[in-house]
Image: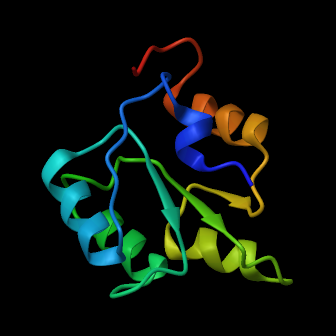
């Protein structure tokens, strides 16, 4: 299985977090250009993380893309309603991930 780091390697600067609380803290402190967010996280789930990102006036502009194994009927809608700007089902397709990132960041911009 290909990892997200392997897909993004040499294309973008990456900040990593091991759980939801750490991810939220890094997002609030670093204000990245984009957040790739797993929904099933320890400590604080992705739904809570994205709500807190979007509630904060300093970070609400940051696009959040959910990467999730939750693919049952209604899961995509629930994820978007929680505040995510897009949704990618696992297992991920590298081309789809890169295409979605480019779309969210704007065509032709260099964010390396």
- Which residue: 18% across, 52% down? 58
Q: Quadrant of residue 66?
A: bottom right
**Numbered marks: total:** 0
Tell me the residue at 42%/43% (across/down): 34
The image quadrant where one finds the N terminus is: bottom right
**Image height of 27 relative to 21, above or below:** above
Viewed as shown, does residue 96 lie left or right of 40? right
Q: Residue furthest bottom?
A: 43
What residue sits 44% from the left and 14% below the top? 110
Spot occupied by residue 69 in the image (x, y as percentages of width and height)? 72, 74
Residue 1 lies, with reference to residue 101, above or below; the image says: below
Find residue 52 and report its image quarter.
Answer: bottom left
Could you say which is closer to the camera, residue 59 or residue 38? Answer: 38
Spot occupied by residue 31 in the image (x, y as percentages of width and height):
23, 45
Estimate the x, y position of residue 112 in percent, counting from the top left: 39, 20
Q: Find the residue positioned furthest to the left.
A: 29
Asked if 67 appears above or below 4 in the picture, the reply is below
Q: Tell me if 76 is positioned left or right of 43 in this view.
A: right
Along the viewing direction, whichever of 12 and 71 lies nearer the viewer: 12
Q: How is the image coloured?
A: rainbow
Residue 63: x, y in percent?
46, 48
Q: Please tell me which residue lies in front, 27 or 107.
A: 27
Q: Quadrant of residue 27?
A: bottom left
Taking the view exactly as shown, the residue that stands out farthest to the right is 73
């Amino acid at each position: 299985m290909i990892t997200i780091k392997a897909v993004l390697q040499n294309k973008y600067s990456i900040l990593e977090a091991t759980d939801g609380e750490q991810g939220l803290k890094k997002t609030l402190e670093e204000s990245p250009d984009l957040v790739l967010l797993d929904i099933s996280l320890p400590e604080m789930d992705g739904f809570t993380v994205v709500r807190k990102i979007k509630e904060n006036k300093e970070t609400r502009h940051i696009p959040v893309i959910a990467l999730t194994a939750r693919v049952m009927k209604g899961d995509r809608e629930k994820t978007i309603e929680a505040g995510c700007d897009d949704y990618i089902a696992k297992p991920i397709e590298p081309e789809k991930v890169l295409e979605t990132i480019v779309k969210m960041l704007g065509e032709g911009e260099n964010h390396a």
